[in-house]
Image (spheres, rainbow, N blue to C red):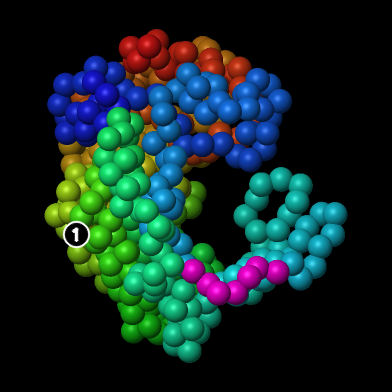
Amino acid sequence: MNHRERFRAIMDFRPFDRPPVWFFGTWRETAERWRREGWREGQTLAEATGMDPDWEDGMWEAHGLVRVSPLSPEKSAVLEETDEYRVVRTSLGAVLKEGKAASSIPQHIEEALKPTRESWERFKRFLDPHDPARRPAGWEATADALARRERTTCFLAGSLYGWPRNWLGTEGVSYLPYDDPALFEEIIEYVSEYFMALYRPVLARAQFDFAYFFEDCCFNTGPLFSPEIYRKFYDRHYRRMIDFYHSAGVRFVMIDSDGKVDDLLPCWLDSGFDIVFPIEVGTWKANPRAFRRKYGRRVRMLGGVDKHVIPRGEAAIRAELDPLRGLVAEGGYIPIPDHRIPPDCSLEQFRTYVGVFKEVFGAG
């Protein structure tokens, strides 16, 4: 089987030869450490570690077929800088304080989008799906070449909470459904239409194995909004988008949220999402086997391997992976570390993880 055939067979609960050996990238500091420890210039991370080709590679900007992110005519500018941090006004208008010492979420001093209709009218100019600048020259040839690949590929297909949260801030996106529900609904509807208009010509020419929704809408005790808010504002737009992608030939649609997703998982399944990712283990001890017992084959999953186990050595890794054998054999599940690998993991430790993974699941 090639990589695409393997992925589809697993997610269709059909016979397959082995699970793919994947992860979800690293922290910046981890990559820097691994380069010092033997990741050679010109090597892909897959080549350096023994993994399969990376499913995430090229996803965020649709493999050069279309420019997905908001486009602003403004330039970002540094407003203040010290040895410890810099304050930046982004091209979208946000003011962020970014630490220099290590990877971390920046402090939001001012949000790019204010919770007002006036601000939204300004901001949505950055989200014109028909802007000619969004179509790179020669994208059709890129699409034709993509059709000949063997590796599994996906594309950023939507973000109805994650993007608005980034623009409004967590406080803004939390209050707006109550303070101005009509404006909140309008933002979500516009963003959903934006993604579909953006991808309509792309999907008429290019083929993908799955679509990826970035949402990050849960934290360590549960979701950042209630199932009631989900059903009131999000459900119908997700349904429309999922139907659109399925009808355009995209077999699977995946939703990404860290944190404790238990309360929203049934909502996602009812909306029609096919795959849930990354099943972050966390302090709440999420378990993909428990989700399968509860929801059966309605739920397909990527993730569910505690990334913090990897530096603890071969025995700990084996103890983490062994209980997943039955779920892997059943299908509809690919075990991968449950988020980006932090810098306490050496390159050699990660190579040990890859070796144990191959042994446990027969992926050698």
Looking at the image, the residue that sits furthest to the right is 83
Does residue 281 sit above or below 246 in this rendering? above
**Is residue 102 located in the magenta-colored stretch of the structure?**
no
Residue 329 seen in the figure: no
- Name the image quarter holding residue 362: top left
The residue at which mark 1 appears reads as 244
Q: Position of residue 245 (x, y in %)?
A: 21, 55
Q: Position of residue 72 (x, y in %)?
A: 53, 72
Q: Give the camera-side residue of 342 and 293.
A: 342
Q: Position of residue 12 (x, y in %)?
A: 17, 33
Closer-to-camera residue (73/225): 73
**Magenta stretch, overall SS:** loop
Write the residue at 27% across / 35% down. 148
Q: Residue visible at 24% across and 17% down?
A: 17
* Quarter holding residue 93: bottom right
Q: Is residue 81 above or below residue 268?
A: below
Which residue is painted at 65% across and 68% down in the image? 76
Name the residue type under label 1: Phe
Q: Which residues are magenta?
A: 71-77
